[in-house]
């Protein structure tokens, strides 16, 4: 399975370069992996898409963190438009997938390299084929060792794209390891988790240009729900009308919503679109421009968190659109109890159940089948192992939709929508060749 399909299917759960990397004068910062990378000439103003994508933890238990170095042999502006606009056609998405590769991976771990290889084979196999024999130790800090691994498909890929794109990729393949050897290293930081308990203090402006402070935004409510969004984010847009209704209900309880908007292209035209859209949605709560003090913590959009009157974050942020979860979390906070949002992928799932999707053909199990496992708000992705099984740890007591996203070569595509059934944690799928 190509990770691009997972990334694109997740929509705006992924960040752009400008959001992921906070560039200083000559460094790009990726705290999810624990590295500040020098910006060298080959990384700037590329013709194709060059995208360092910090995945973060690929195995919490064994402390392995990953960053993928992505290249796509197509104009960068076209690739970014396909990745981050809702209007992209299926043909454009497929074209991007065909044009892209993952030419290397940076791994951070406090375990030995044998463990790292095991984790990568379990989580990245079939998506990023790595050359473990050419693994290069590029740095260490705070008990973590950092490795760079090139991919095995470079020669075939560069031959297939040819021309200026091939030459540009070859230069990146040489430049990135060198830049990593001169990087700054530190222990990976989960910025979103780290928000809980922090007191936010900032000054920004509303969408009409009026100065507002965090104290003004938060002191008026017992609890304020802060929704971080952007007009480019379809998942954000889809919940806006419901948030207006929710704000009306919250006001009766002395609570409310504040929106913080971040735009990839912060122009007057963009903000006018936001103002016009909010009028159409019936947005009835204040929205302000995203302050850097909050944006530095974010890994995906929408992200929603709750603060008290002092601006202290009361609970783990909720990553992803989840209107029902917003309201239940707020109710729990008003009652003085903490609840762990089920949409936060790193959180401990309350009442979790493990579902197994079993994929086979006439001869037996089929591995490397990409599976999407969805409820009303969140989709999770996994790939079948050598036993033909993809497993999902999710809240129990729900019905989930199961989709086959990608099959190995030689198999027919399967567009069937499968469902979990009461009393069973198994979903069985039979593929045809």
Image (spheres, rainbow, N blue to C red):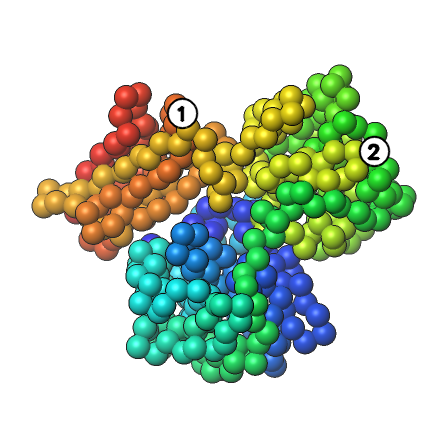
Q: Residue furthest front?
A: 143
Looking at the image, residue 279 lies above or below residue 371: above
Residue wearing tag 2? 219
- Out of 250 and 191, give the one closest to the viewer: 191
Q: CA distance from mark 1 to mark 2?
A: 37 Å
Looking at the image, residue 142 lies above or below residue 237: below
Q: Residue furthest right?
A: 210
State which quadrant residue 257 falls in: top right
Q: Give the residue drawn at x 65%, y 25%.
A: 336
Looking at the image, residue 125 lies above or below residue 221: below
Looking at the image, residue 28 lies above or below residue 62: below
Q: For the residues carrying marks 1 and 2, which lies nearer the camera in this image?
A: 2
Q: Quadrant of the N terminus?
A: bottom left
Provide residue 100's location: percent of width, then percent of height: 43, 64
Residue 23 shown left or right of residue 309 in the figure: left
Provide residue 62's location: percent of width, then percent of height: 39, 56
Q: Is residue 37 visible?
A: no
Near mark 2 (Cα within 10 A), the count class, few <14, some 14-19 or many ≥20, is some
The numbered dot on residue 398 is: 1
- Out of 280 and 179, give the one closest to the viewer: 179
Element type where label 1 sits in the image: loop
Element type where label 2 sits in the image: loop
Q: Give the residue drawn at x 73%, y 29%.
A: 223
Provide residue 136's location: percent of width, then percent of height: 41, 78
Provide residue 414's location: percent of width, then percent of height: 28, 40
């Amino acid at each position: 399975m190509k990770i691009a399909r997972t990334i694109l299917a997740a929509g705006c759960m992924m960040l752009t370069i400008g959001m992921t990397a906070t560039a200083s004068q000559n460094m790009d910062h990726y705290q999810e992996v624990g590295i500040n990378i020098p910006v060298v000439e080959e990384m700037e103003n590329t013709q194709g898409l060059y995208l360092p994508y910090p995945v973060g933890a690929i195995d919490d238990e064994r402390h392995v963190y990953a960053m993928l170095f992505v290249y796509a042999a197509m104009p960068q502006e076209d690739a970014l438009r396909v990745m981050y606009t809702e209007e992209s056609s299926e043909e454009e998405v497929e074209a991007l997938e065909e044009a892209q590769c993952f030419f290397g991976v940076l791994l951070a771990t406090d375990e030995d390299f044998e463990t790292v290889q095991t984790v990568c084979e379990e989580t990245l196999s079939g998506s990023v084929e790595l050359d473990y024999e050419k693994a290069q130790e590029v740095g260490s800090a705070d008990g973590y060792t950092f490795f760079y691994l090139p991919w095995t498909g470079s020669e075939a890929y560069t031959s297939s794209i040819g021309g200026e794109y091939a030459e540009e990729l070859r230069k990146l393949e040489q430049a990135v390891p060198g830049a990593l050897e001169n990087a700054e290293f530190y222990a990976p930081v989960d910025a979103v988790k780290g928000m809980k308990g922090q007191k936010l203090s900032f000054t920004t402006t509303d969408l009409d240009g009026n100065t507002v402070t965090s104290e003004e935004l938060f002191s008026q409510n017992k609890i304020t729900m802060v929704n971080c969004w952007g007009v480019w984010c379809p998942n954000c847009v889809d919940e806006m009308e419901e948030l207006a209704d929710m704000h009306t209900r919250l006001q009766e309880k002395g609570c409310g919503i504040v929106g913080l908007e971040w735009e990839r292209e912060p122009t007057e035209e963009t903000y006018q679109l936001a103002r016009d859209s909010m009028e159409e949605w019936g947005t009835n709560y204040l929205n302000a421009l995203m302050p850097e003090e909050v944006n530095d913590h974010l890994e995906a959009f929408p992200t929603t968190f709750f603060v008290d009157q002092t601006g202290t974050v009361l609970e783990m942020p909720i990553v992803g659109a989840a209107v029902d979860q917003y309201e239940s979390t707020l109710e729990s906070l008003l009652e003085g109890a903490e609840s762990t949002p089920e949409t936060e992928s790193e959180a401990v799932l309350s009442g979790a159940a493990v579902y197994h999707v079993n994929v086979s053909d006439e001869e037996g199990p089929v591995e490397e089948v990409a599976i999407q496992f969805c409820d009303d708000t969140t989709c999770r992705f996994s790939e079948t192992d050598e036993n033909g099984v993809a497993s999902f740890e999710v809240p129990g007591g729900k019905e989930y939709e199961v989709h086959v996203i990608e099959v190995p070569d030689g198999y027919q595509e399967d567009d069937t929508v499968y469902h979990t059934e009461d009393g069973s944690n198994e979903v069985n799928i039979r593929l045809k060749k």
